[in-house]
Image (spheres, grey):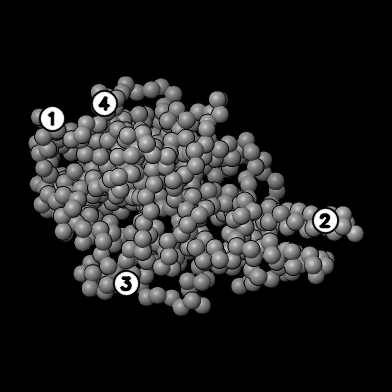
Amino acid sequence: MSDHNDVQSDYGSDLSPDEETLVNGFISEFDDNIKAGSELAATTFDDHENPRGFRLPRHTERENPTSPSLQSALQFNGDSDYFEHLQVKPIAKSDESGVARQSCVPKQASIEPVVPDNRSPLERFRTKPRKTLSVTDLISPAWCELQYWYTLTKYGRKKRTSAMSRGSTVHKILEDTAHQTVPIDVSTKEDAWGLRIWNVIQGLRTLRETGIARELEVWGIVDGLVVNGVIDEVSLQCPDQDLEDSAVDGRAHGMVPKEMLPVNQKSIREMMVSPHPLKETRHSHRLASTTDPKVFLTDVKTRGSKTVPKGPTIRPTLMQLMLYRCLLSNLASNQIDAAVLFARYDLDADAVFSDAFLAQLSGLNGSCDATRVDLQRIQEGSASTQDSMEQVLNHNSLHRLWGLMMSEFQYTMPSGKYSIGNVLKVEYRDQSEGSIIGFKTFLHDQDVIDGYIQDQMKWWQGKREAQGVAIEEAYKCRICEFSKDCTWRKAKVDDAVQAHRTRLRATA
């Protein structure tokens, strides 16, 4: 493992002692932020491509968000008894000099010289037959665009680390507190996609039933491009009621700086709406009443240290949650053209699901229907009163199943985008134990996410070059596997050395 403190090994020995001191100061100035930065750098934003099974609600009776059993699931303390109850062993903590450190300071990766490719990142990495854009693709550059560019050119996608694996274990335990996953066999790609949509339907039903749903997949269309992601947690419980009230009253300014949009810049809502707008349902324009429940989004981050990150290290998470809210808002308002989605994945939306797939769903869907509650806002004759077999057969294609999912969104979020709270929450948990370290809440800021997505799409579409981090965030270079060959890092050091030489000549 290369020594990130050894500047000479990176830049040669043509510097004077004073210049070497300057370079060392440039690279080491932010040592106190390294630990916090490394944790976020080692965390990925998982967007699941493949369904793992059909999700049934974990609770068989209706629970409100403040019930003791639900609170115990939300705030487990990470002791061994809790993990043994779920038949999952807690991961032992790694020694400071062991696996944890290796995952934070990876071995230097050499960037292989290749023939210049002038295609845009979108053309090279996210055009058919390659995967679609994900929330990970749009958010990872918030840490460092150049690092993500090197990651794509070398690996094609984010490489999985041991820290990410430990984080996935915690996420799976949390998911199992809300859902029971049952394996389902699929015969066609339409079956596989049908399972993904059914899991969203079950997630919405579980949210109404218990007050919380986890691992809710969402899709959207940005500038005609399909984007997918998975929200860690959607809840009916507001994490900060005072902050939400202040947002509703128009008195809050948010925790992120306001940025005015240029006159010619489209908002993310304009970018995400189909070129051929769908007919909006009645509820998409109705303001939420005081009796309508609101849903709130939470993202769970796992860390190897017992500290909550601060400063620029939390920027990717802020953008991630705000983007999730935009995606969910457009789904809840029925503003996503499913035909664009199905065409991108080469799916036949009218093809009937396989008999084996329908048979499996019929049995499991019956178990789930038995736990549902006939909410007053559900219109008479809704899916909740149908026999499970009849419901499955009546929605036996992607086109019909998408319609059922839209109905479930209307039942769950009757006011469309106005049913989604403004307060967003990030929760930090220990990688080894799963215990809660702390959390942060902040307000959704449409101007900020609009500006961020607009700028990111320019890079993806090849309208500008990838950029390195700001000088104040140079500590990130210390934990980057591409630092040895990073053109931005070398250029910044060269600039600093040249400026120092200029000052010396001026004072001579």
Report the mark closest to the observer, 4 or 1: 4
Q: In this picture, is 116 found above or below 100?
A: above
Between 34 and 390, the residue placed more toward the observer is 34
Q: Amino acid at mark 4?
A: Arg
Q: Amino acid at mark 1?
A: Gln
- Seen at 51% across and 72% down, the residue is 101
The kind of secondary structure element at disc 3 is loop
Would you say the residues marked 1 and 2 are in contact, meaning their CB atoms lie under 8 Å apart?
no
Return the residue at label 2.
503
Q: In this picture, is 302 found above or below 413?
A: below
Residue 485 image position (x, y, % from top left): 68, 59
Badge 3: residue crowd in 10 Å (few <14, some 14–19, many ≥20): many
Return the residue at label 4.
286
Residue 353 image position (x, y, % from top left): 26, 39
Q: How many marks?
A: 4
Between 198 and 234, the residue placed more toward the observer is 234
Badge 4: residue crowd in 10 Å (few <14, some 14–19, many ≥20): some
Q: Amino acid at mark 2?
A: Arg
Spatial CA distance of label 1 from label 3 is 45 Å
- Seen at 60% across and 62% down, the residue is 30
Badge 2: residue crowd in 10 Å (few <14, some 14–19, many ≥20): few
Return the residue at label 1.
379
The kind of secondary structure element at disc 2 is helix
The earlier-in-sequence mark between 4 and 1 is 4
Return the residue at label 3.
90
Spatial CA distance of label 2 from label 4 is 63 Å
The earlier-in-sequence mark between 1 and 3 is 3
Residue 147 image position (x, y, % from top left): 59, 54
Q: Amino acid at mark 3?
A: Pro
Spatial CA distance of label 3 from label 4 is 46 Å
Q: Residue 191: in sight, yes or no?
A: no
